[in-house]
Amino acid sequence: MSRLAFLLALLLCGCGRLQPLPVPVPPAPEPDVVLPVPAGPLRVVIWRETDLARVPEGQLQQFFGPDLHAWFKAHGIGYRIWDQNISTTSLTAPEWRAAAEVRPKQVPWIVATNGRKTVEGALPGTAAETIKLLEPLLP
């Protein structure tokens, strides 16, 4: 029997039914990473780039000046100011390790949470603006 006749016989008897190829299902988009942070005191991480040549004066004052640091201390707020390239392997406290997993979209960047509400975005231009941003998170 010729090859064509054999294929025709298979098709006629239903044995050689052509099956459509399965359509690949695209993977579901990954959800935004939501880190389990227990409710509690306000914690703040300010991300910066140590090698950044030009940072506005108001933001430099937030890194090194007394105003924001004094406000954090007066309210018992745990805070860290980290370079965006920090290694998370050296962090032992779970709340700070979890915070280090949230990488900034730009620098300087601020992430603050009290476990119930989180604020994340570009660091405001002055300490007063940053305090105004964080005040709603206070208990």
Image: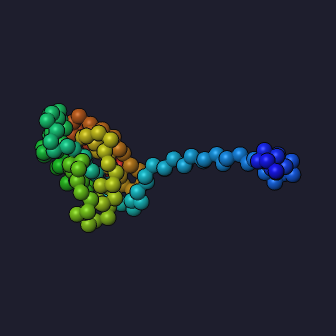
Left or right: where does residue 50 sit relative to residue 26?
left
Left or right: where does residue 114 sit relative to residue 15?
left
Question: Which of these two is toward me, 73 or 53?
Answer: 53
Q: Quadrant of residue 96?
A: bottom left
Quarter of the rendering occupied by the C terminus: bottom left
| Res. 26 visible in picture | yes
Q: How many marks?
A: 0
| Res. 134 visible in picture | no
- Residue at 15 percent across and 42 percent down: it is 51
Q: Position of residue 39 (x, y in %)?
A: 39, 60
Question: Which of these two is toward me, 135 or 97?
Answer: 97
Question: Which of these two is toward me, 123 or 129?
Answer: 123
- Residue at 54 percent across and 49 percent down: it is 27
Q: Quadrant of residue 61?
A: top left
- Residue at 23 percent across and 50 percent down: it is 85
Q: Position of residue 63 (x, y in %)?
A: 16, 44
Q: Quadrant of residue 95?
A: bottom left
Residue sitting farthest toward the right: 13
Q: Position of residue 5 (x, y in %)?
A: 82, 46
Residue sitting farthest toward the front: 1
Q: Is residue 107 above or below residue 114?
A: above
- Residue at 28 percent across and 51 percent down: it is 44
Q: Is residue 18 above or below residue 91?
A: above
Left or right: where does residue 79 sit relative to residue 121?
left
Q: Position of residue 16 (x, y in %)?
A: 78, 51
Left or right: where does residue 12 sit relative to residue 102?
right
